[in-house]
Image (spheres, rainbow, N blue to C red):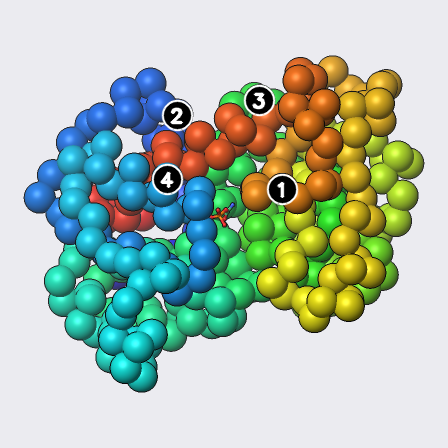
Amino acid sequence: NKNIISIADLSRTELELIVSTAQSIKQDPRPQLLAGKVIASCFFEASTRTRLSFETAVQRLGGTVIGFDSGGNTSLAQKGETLADSVQVISSYSDAFFMRHPQEGAARLASEYSSVPVINGGDGANQHPTQTLLDLFSIYETQGTLEGLKVAFVGDLKYGRTVHSLAQALSLFGCQFYFVAPEALRMPDYLCEELSEAGIQFTHVENLDQVLPELDVLYMTRVQKERFDPTEYQHMKSKYVLTAAMLEGVKENLKILHPLPRVDEITTDVDHTPYAYYFQQAENGVYARQSLLALVLKEEL
Ligand code: CP
């Protein structure tokens, strides 16, 4: 089984293969690569994009989806069944198991009990590797390379699983990072140590305006209400709000990405600028997940 639990489960060569396959699938979105396959889609935490793009990906490839969303009336939610027991059973019905869970490490645990490949669709504040695949594809599509780019990550870098996975992946391509966050939401130490050991240049900054003119990629994120107590959330939210007026003087090739959903961290006037790419990025979720599924199930990873 090739489990995709953390972005670190994929090498640079494998990431490049996933991106190039996503590119081919975008040209021809309906190759019947999953005909006859049943894929379990198990969401223990809310999702719009990840679940729907994943399920679209399966169906466009000719496969069948079984599963439930976070409101699921399952034996785990209603009758106290353990995740381990649920996974053993669901994986006996399916050819691959895709899941999101609010607890860090849940996907890793599931992979220990699954008889089929497990793909992590987000585990708490830890990792979101399939988001990274569509982020990489979107960056490659717009910049023509993944190498040596200047990338700023903005917002909740402490709990932002999309940021954790993407920074690890881009570190394989020699990118340079700015981590733009208030002191309390800084990138976790373990990740900074990992980047330092890999010789990656990164700088912590609090002022976004200061770095905007240098950037190739601006990765905005939401302060995630669900990871804070209400008082702390009120204090942290709206720390960084990107407006169209702030984009004067940026590089022509700048692209603004955001995993979405957004709250107020990008004003809607930015949507109409040539720099906004977050809705195309969300669409790329289908192609990137088609690519990953096809490669995992054909055992090409
Ligand atoms: N980007 C992302 O994970 O969005 P959802 O929470 O809607 O799946």
Task: Verify CB contact (< 8 Å) between mark 4 and mark 2.
Answer: no
Q: Residues within 10 Å of mark 4 (few under 14, many from 20)?
A: many
Task: Verify CB contact (< 8 Å) between mark 3 and mark 1.
Answer: no
On screen, 29 above or below 110? above
At which x and y percent is residue 43?
Answer: 36, 59
Q: In the picture provided, is 3 more to the left or to the right than 163?
A: left
At which x and y percent is residue 232?
Answer: 77, 67
The three-letter code of the residue at mark 4 reads Ser
Q: Which mark is residue 142?
A: 3
Tell me which residue sits at (85%, 39%) in the image: 208
Tell me which residue sits at (57%, 41%) in the image: 260
Q: Which mark is residue 262?
A: 1
Cα–Cα gap, marks 4 and 2: 16 Å
The three-letter code of the residue at mark 2 reads Gln
At which x and y percent is residue 123?
Answer: 48, 64
Disc 3 or 4, which lies upstream in sequence? 4
Q: Which mark is residue 227?
A: none
Mark 4 lies on residue: 53
The three-letter code of the residue at mark 1 reads Arg
Disc 4 or 1, which lies upstream in sequence? 4
Q: Nearer the viewer, residue 263 or 65?
A: 263
Task: Verify CB contact (< 8 Å) between mark 1 and mark 2.
Answer: no
Look at the image and tell me whether residue 33 can be seen: no
